Amino acid sequence: MKPLFDLHVHTISSGHAYSSLKENIEAARERGLSAVGISDHAPEMPGASHIFHFTNLKVVRESLLGVRICRGIEANILDFYGTIDVENRIARKLHFLIASLHTPCIQPGTAEENTRALLGAMKNPWVKIIGHPDDDRYPLDYEELVSGAKREKVALEINNSSFRASSARQNGRKNAALMLTICRREGVPVILGSDAHIWYDVGEFSLCRELLDELDFPPELVLNYTLEGLDFVLNSGASTEGEDGPLAPPSPE
């Protein structure tokens, strides 16, 4: 089956990516994608844009060059309870949020702490995707992670960038294989993400698909293969109104 969309895509606004929004949209069209996401890094990532960048995404048309444009952000998880660096008033203007662990924003903890951080992020109503949960620098309890994703209806990402030899993440393929095995058993869907930081990587899922084929992973559990899968991770109520305040899970007992 052919992937129809890629939501994990960065532009020069992330501070360490190298292509414009227009270049990424053109690349998505050339790949035959129906939709592409804008998921630049949220402000706590060094070099990222000011929050005004994300409030102004409303100027981007819903469709360009025949490709649907989905407005999003890659939020940074800031503590082991899942607090992220995106406020409600910003989050509700976007179509989707990816929440990820990044070393400039949170130092790795124990498997219990790292897993608690991701489970906490899943409880945020705007978070629809957990980004690259595959890095041995952040060890995880994958049984708990998949169980939480199933409960909260959040997609776990299979990140093409994690499988490259040049990736700073460690043992991404091994960890993704373990996660996929549990997802298959539990019937939990996953989402493919290129994590593109330059235009020619938009929609590049070849390493992901090699792993899916190797594991004989059910295509019906890969969200990218249908437009209904896109709907699963989009906030249909994205608007320009909202309340201030940090988007954080309930305080721990």
Image (cartoon, rainbow, N blue to C red):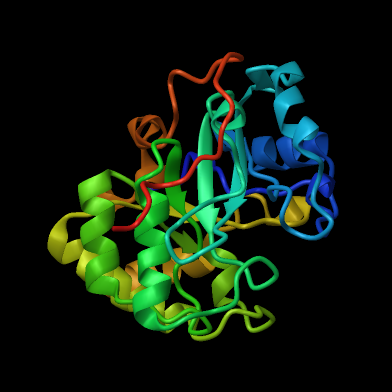
Tell me if residue 16 comes above or below residue 172 in the rendering: above
Tell me if residue 165 comes above or below residue 127 in the rendering: below
State the residue lying farthest toward the left: 185
Front in this rendered view, residue 218 or 249: 249
Can residue 192 be seen from the camera position used here? yes
- Picture residue at 34% right of the left edge, 57% below the top: 252
Tell me if residue 201 comes above or below residue 1 in the rendering: below
Can residue 216 be seen from the camera position used here? no
Where is the C terminus found, in terms of image quarters?
bottom left
Give how far across and how far down residue 143 sits, in percent.
22, 71
User: Is residue 90 rendered to the left or right of residue 120?
Assistant: right
Front in this rendered view, residue 25 or 13: 13
- Picture residue at 22% right of the left edge, 51% below the top: 150
- Picture residue at 81% right of the left edge, 56% below the top: 17
Give how far across and how far down residue 233 sits, in percent.
41, 37
Give how far across and how far down residue 54 sits, in percent.
72, 32
User: Is residue 40 rendered to the left or right of residue 22?
Assistant: left
Please tell me in which quadrant of the rendered image residue 70 appears.
top right
State the residue lying farthest toward the front: 253
Give how far across and how far down residue 146 sits, in percent.
26, 62
Please tell me in which quadrant of the rendered image residue 50 appears.
top right
Q: How many marks?
A: 0
- Picture residue at 61% right of the left edge, 48% below the top: 85
